[in-house]
């Protein structure tokens, strides 16, 4: 069991950022970003003083539909030519249970920065077969995409819009630690 301040590097091969949004007002489309990088600094036994920083390569978006992914990368949505990354930097961590926290931070999408709060669960820690200390975290939250300039939409013949405003976020992180 690790104690003390440790720097944890997100392991992109074992981490995932997923999102879900309503489509046509009655269905849900899910996608993910595979280009996740980040650092967590803190004591895994008490994350209240920890800092969380993450960067997501928006070009790694994958909704299992190439045409939709290209549209999401375009100026209608993320505009990856101008804004290739999403950033998150924590500003406050509050303990809510034995292994649960509220992590509030600044989320930047398309150069628009807004505060968001994620429900985070510390899922455990241990040594891998090569002697590296690892931790696991799960996080969930929601944002309104329009708050970040993602305003494109199309009206539906029966009323309503093609793309919902609320985006649910789910994050699974495995990170490798070092005390140096």
Image: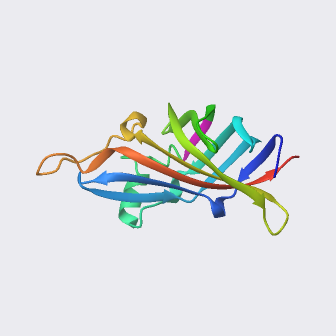
Residue 37, horizontal then vertical, whole percent: 65, 51
Q: Residue furthest front?
A: 98
- Along the line of sight, which residue is nearer the eye, 83 or 137? 137
Q: Residue at x 40, y 51 (%)?
A: 74
Question: Which residue occupies 11% across, 51% down?
Answer: 158
| Percent position of residue 73, x then y | 44, 53
Q: Nearer the viewer, residue 80 or 63?
A: 63
- x then y, percent, for residue 86: 54, 44
Task: Name the residue at 75% across, 49% down.
Answer: 8
Picture quarter containing residue 166? top left
Q: What is the total number of numbered labels drawn onto the structure image? A: 0
Q: Residue furthest right?
A: 180
Range of residues picked out in magenta? 85-89
Image spot of residue 35 (x, y percent): 59, 57
Tell me, yes or no, whether the highlighted magenta stretch contains residue 86.
Answer: yes
Q: Is residue 151 left or right of residue 162?
A: right
- The dominant secondary structure in magenta is strand
Q: Looking at the image, which residue sits at the far bottom?
A: 129
Q: Which residue sits at x=44%, y=53%?
A: 19
Question: Where is 45 relative to 74, above or below?
Answer: above
How are the residues colored?
rainbow
């Amino acid at each position: 069991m690790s104690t003390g301040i440790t720097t944890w590097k997100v392991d992109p091969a074992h981490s995932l950022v997923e999102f879900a949004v309503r489509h046509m007002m009655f269905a849900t489309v899910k996608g993910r970003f595979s280009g996740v990088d980040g650092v967590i600094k803190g004591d895994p036994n008490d994350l209240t003083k920890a800092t969380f920083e993450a960067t997501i390569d928006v070009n790694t978006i994958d909704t299992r539909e190439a045409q939709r992914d290209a549209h999401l990368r375009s100026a209608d949505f993320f505009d990856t030519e101008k804004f290739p990354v999403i950033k998150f930097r924590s500003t406050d961590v509050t303990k809510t249970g034995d292994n649960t926290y509220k992590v509030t931070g600044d989320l930047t999408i398309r150069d628009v920065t807004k505060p968001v709060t994620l429900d985070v669960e510390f899922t455990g820690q241990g040594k891998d077969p090569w002697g590296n200390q690892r931790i696991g975290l799960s996080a969930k939250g929601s944002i309104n995409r329009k708050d970040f300039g993602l305003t494109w939409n199309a009206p539906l013949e029966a009323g309503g819009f093609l793309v919902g405003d609320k985006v649910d976020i789910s994050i699974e992180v495995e990170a490798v630690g070092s005390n140096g």
